[in-house]
Amino acid sequence: MNEAFMSDNTAPVDFRILRVLEEANTGFEKPYGYDKWTNEAKLLIRSEFGADAEFYPVMNGTGANVISLASVLSPFQAVICAESAHINVDECGAPERFLGSKLISVRTELGKLAPEDITPLLHSEGFEHHVQPYVISISQVTETGLAYSPQEVSALSKFASEHNLLLHIDGSRLANAAVHLGCSMGEAVKGADLVSFGGTKNGMLMGEAVLLLNPEIGQNIKYYRKQGMQLFSKMRYLSAQFIPYLRDGIWRENAVQANSMAAKLASGFVKAGLKLAYPVNSNGVFVYLPDSLISKIERNFGFYVWDEETGLCRFMCSFATTEQDVNSLLNLV
């Protein structure tokens, strides 16, 4: 069984990440983020995301989302997100449980939010019987594999500022978005107040990070990280991975490979007469398959049937996906 298309989490770790972990695994270092590796990673983060960026490594993506949101929310405040957002669908209710805050989900055809989707939810400002929206959360890329352009992010940022809201970006696949957009990762989130920055899906072993880009927020985040069980004692092993990832352009190289394999797979599906559900902006391909073809592919490849009623399926590529993997799958179509 070939699991190359089930998830980008099925991929191995980039050997360059393993190499830096071996380098970090020498001698003694202060724990909890007061080590030289974390300090170097902070400088690289600021080079990529701006001089005001604050870097708080955590252990996983759900932790990054929960801790980032917890650092800015009161329990009577709410988060506005797309109905398909990871925080709304795939985190087992962790945000609601640990934040004590409501998620207000918005149904959108493509999983993207725009200011006009949010405006109708803001009419109860100051009314104590209703939760008060305070954070707009979007995913870059979305759970449907679509990227927000810098102009779209800027429009949401401007809208948020005008309405005294904050903009959070779930960037578990931020590298894939930046490659598609032809920009830096910093440019792909410019205007956001806080970012959940991912690398696990793009070659890293473990660990994500909360990035605070607005110097006026999140002053107590280190306490939320500790309470939220996301403070890793041997922090150097999380932080060290970000050094070659950013410094050596691993993020871009790996995302280029993942995105290009997804584009090749999508092209093959279309040539076979199959219908794509969404444009392919990143490393995910969503396609409608008949039951007979689903059964045929399932005997050889791992993938997700997203909707059994419509036959919508998701195929996810990674930096380790090869042309041979793609061709072997397309030979079954």
Image (spheres, grey):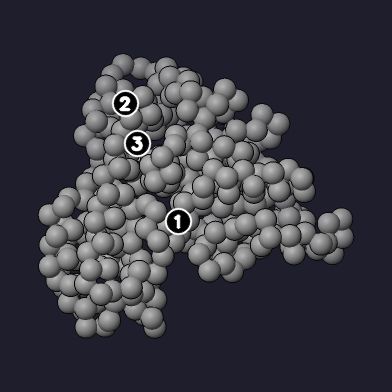
Percent position (x, y) of residue 88?
Answer: 55, 62
Quadrant assignment, res 278: bottom left
Task: Give, as a three-letter code, the residue at label 3.
Answer: Trp
Relative to 228, 116 lies left or right: right
Q: Compared to 149, does 302 lie above or below? A: below
3D distance between C-alphas at marks 3 and 1: 18 Å
Quadrant assignment, res 30: top left
Q: Secondary structure at mark 1?
A: loop
Whether pointer 3 and pointer 1 mark residues with C-beta atoms closer than 8 Å, the reply is no
Percent position (x, y) of residue 192?
Answer: 60, 40
Q: Earlier in the sequence, mark 3 or mark 1?
A: 1
Residue hosting label 3: 251
Q: Compared to 104, does 219 lie above or below? A: above
Q: Nearer the viewer, mark 3 or mark 1?
A: 1
Residue hosting label 1: 146
Residue visible at 35% across and 69% down? 276
Residue hosting label 2: 248
Quadrant assignment, res 131: bottom right
Relative to 207, 46 lies left or right: right
Residue visible at 17% across and 64% down? 329
Q: In the drawing, what numbered circle is on residue 316?
A: none
Between 271 and 298, the residue placed more toward the observer is 271
Relative to 327, 239 lies left or right: right
Label 1, residues with CA under 10 Å away: few <14, some 14-19, many ≥20: many
Percent position (x, y) of residue 194?
Answer: 59, 39
Residue visible at 35% across and 17% down? 28
Task: Give, as a three-letter code, the residue at label 1.
Answer: Leu
